């Protein structure tokens, strides 16, 4: 039996106050991104069928009332309750038929009109009695076995939205649900922010394209295909995918070229403090600015962020799990800020199925898999006993990331933890 537990600090990982000297907390790093990135303002018009995943550049207003007229919510008979007397059943003559798409008709006094769901309510009628409460007499009359209330089973004009109402706010990511609302509002096309232009620069002399023959100390490149897939899921314009050896002059040259045509340059590798880690000095060499370098995070400690002129730079570590974790935490935040999206990052509290040990100093992030739910409906997760920054083959089995606070050395089975689900745009809806 997993015991109940007290929620951690409601901030992202509860470790703002305790971290390795000189390193930002996750929240502080996200704050730097929020303060440093200005949303793109350029917009374009796209049709509804091309709008999935895009970000609205302006509010969407209803072009008419919805419903545009009083409409029947049921199959049945339209009547005027003032004509029916005080007791049921009442036998009344029929006065035609109305179906969805028909022009509104007029109901004669003392009559009932056959009406189908979605049809305009005839003038002179103020209620619809569902057909299950009627009996056809077979002689152009109908027996009303109950007396409806005025307004019964009628969707009144404008009850959902009125003409000019805001249906979707600027900054909304256009999911299928949002596109349904826009279509209901009568919009055939929508103003959206232009796609963010992103360039990827993979650094490392040891990297070779996956599937090619490896020689000497070469390894296959994981970060290029993984980041390319992650960015495709975010509906951006990937304007370049480049590779570069660990040569400062070549890296600087690539940064200068890529920053001239992209809104965001993402690099992998070269952001630590080794002899072949040149990214920070290269950013300075091309006139850029490093806004932060290093976050109290495991894996992903060297992650860095800055700008080169009007282009932003996100420096991810070279180890593939570190790169994907820091992309999940910071890359999506940069893209959302560029798009003008201020939605809070989705995270929840989960229960650990196993005890966890951790070396204090940095917030540790581990891929975790949901293995069940407790009686209160909370997800129960399990994860490895340690984080290995170079291992990704078990990632397809994980549902998200748990965050172990930096000041915690041990958590018992049943401890409650922050949980970040993997990016829901990665192959799913937007």
Image (cartoon, helix red, strand yellow):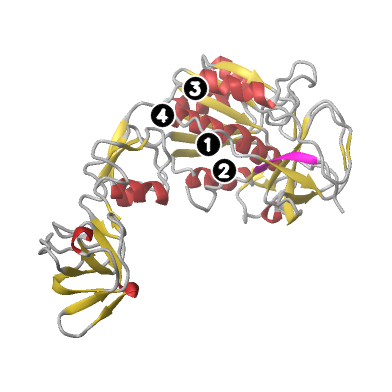
Q: Earlier in the sequence, mark 1 or mark 2?
A: 1
Task: Give the residue at x 62% y 52%.
Answer: 210
Tags 1 and 2 in contact by the CB under 8 Å rule? yes
Q: CA distance from mark 1 to mark 4?
A: 12 Å
- Name the residue tied to disc 1: 200
Work out whether 123 lies above or below 351: below
Q: Residues within 10 Å of mark 1 (few under 14, many from 20)?
A: many
> Callout 1: helix, strand or loop?
strand
**Measured along the vertical axis of the image, is residue 304 above or below residue 88?**
above
Q: Position of residue 84 (x, y in %)?
A: 22, 65
Q: Which residues are magenta?
A: 416-420
Query: Which comes sooner in the sequence, label 4 or label 2?
Result: 2
Q: Nearer the viewer, residue 11 or 292?
A: 11
Look at 89% across and 32% down and name the residue there.
409
Q: Earlier in the sequence, mark 1 or mark 3?
A: 3
Q: Which residue is mark 2?
A: 227
Secondary structure under the numbered disc 4 in the rendered image: loop
**Which label sits on residue 413?**
none
The residue carrying mark 3 is 37
Mark in the foreground, 3 or 4:
3
């Amino acid at each position: 039996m997993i015991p109940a537990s007290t929620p951690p600090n409601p901030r992202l990982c509860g470790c703002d106050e305790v971290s390795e000297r000189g390193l930002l907390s996750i929240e502080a790093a996200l704050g730097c991104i929020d303060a440093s990135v200005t949303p793109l303002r350029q917009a374009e018009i796209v049709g509804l069928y091309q709008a999935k995943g895009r970000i609205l550049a302006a509010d969407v207003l209803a072009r008419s009332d919805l419903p545009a007229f009083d409409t029947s919510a049921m199959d049945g008979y339209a009547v005027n309750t003032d004509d029916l007397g005080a007791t049921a059943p009442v036998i009344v003559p029929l006065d035609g038929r109305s179906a969805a798409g028909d022009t509104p008709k007029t109901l004669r006094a003392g009559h009932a009109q056959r009406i189908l769901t979605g049809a305009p309510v005839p003038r002179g009628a103020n209620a619809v009695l569902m057909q299950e409460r009627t009996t056809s007499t077979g002689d152009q009359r109908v027996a009303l076995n109950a007396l409806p209330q005025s307004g019964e089973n009628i969707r009144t004009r404008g009850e959902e939205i009125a003409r000019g109402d805001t249906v979707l706010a600027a900054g909304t990511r256009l999911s299928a649900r949002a596109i349904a609302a826009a279509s209901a509002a009568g919009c055939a096309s929508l103003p959206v922010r232009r796609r963010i232009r992103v360039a990827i620069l993979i650094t490392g002399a040891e990297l070779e394209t996956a599937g090619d023959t490896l020689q000497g100390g070469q390894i296959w490149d994981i970060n290029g295909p993984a980041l390319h897939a992650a960015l495709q899921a975010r509906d951006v314009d990937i304007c370049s995918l480049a590779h570069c050896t660990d040569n400062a002059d070549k890296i600087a040259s690539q940064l200068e070229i890529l920053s001239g045509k992209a809104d965001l340059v993402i690099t992998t590798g070269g952001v630590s403090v080794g002899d072949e880690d040149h990214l920070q000095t290269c950013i300075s060499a091309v006139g850029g600015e490093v806004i932060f370098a290093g976050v109290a995070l495991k894996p992903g400690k060297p992650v860095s962020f800055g700008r080169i002129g009007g282009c932003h730079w996100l420096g991810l570590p070279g180890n593939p799990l570190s790169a994907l974790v820091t992309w999940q935490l910071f890359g999506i935040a940069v893209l959302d800020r560029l798009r003008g999206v201020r939605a809070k990052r989705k995270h929840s509290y989960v229960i650990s199925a196993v005890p966890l040990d951790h070396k204090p100093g940095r917030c540790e992030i581990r891929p975790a898999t949901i293995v069940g739910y407790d009686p209160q409906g909370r997800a129960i997760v399990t994860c490895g006993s340690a984080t290995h920054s170079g291992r990704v083959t078990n990632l397809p089995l994980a549902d998200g990331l748990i965050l172990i606070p930096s000041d915690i050395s041990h958590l018992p089975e049943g401890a409650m933890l922050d949980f970040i689900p993997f990016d829901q745009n990665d192959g799913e809806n937007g």
